[in-house]
Image (cartoon, rainbow, N blue to C red):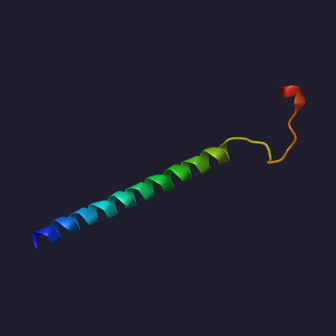
Amino acid sequence: MTALSEWLQLMLAEIARKREDLERARAEEAQRLREEGARPHSEPGAAENPTTR
């Protein structure tokens, strides 16, 4: 029975780690999207101004 308890503890720890990784990735993605929304940028495919080079 002890082996099952150790195995169960390892599995629960792995699940918790994966959940934390997913939450961290979601938070990073949300932060990236907020930063992109706050930053002015040109439209995709818009012609560049040759005088700014």
Instruction: From the top left corner, tell me how far across and down residue 38 is, in percent.
Output: 66, 44
Look at the image and tell me in which quarter the N terminus lies: bottom left
Point out the image quarter for the C terminus: top right
Q: Is residue 30 above or below residue 39?
A: below
Rendering quarter of residue 8: bottom left
Foreground residue, 5 or 39?
5
- Label total for image: 0
Q: Position of residue 35 (x, y in %)?
A: 61, 44
Relative to 32, is 6 on the left or the right? Answer: left
* Vertical order, 19 against 35 (above or below): below
Picture coordinates of residue 7, whole percent (x, y):
21, 67
Residue furthest to the left: 2
Q: Is residue 34 above or below residue 23?
A: above
Residue at 44% from the left image edge and 58% from the top image edge = 22
Residue 20, position as x, y percentages in the image: 38, 56
Q: Nearer the viewer, residue 37 or 47?
A: 47
Measuring 86% from the left and 36% from the top, which residue is drawn there? Answer: 48
46 and 6: which is toward the camera: 6
Q: Is residue 6 left or right of residue 48?
A: left
The residue under the point 27% across, 60% down is 13
Residue 1 left/right relative to 26: left
Residue reaching furthest to the front: 3
| Quadrant hosting residue 3 | bottom left
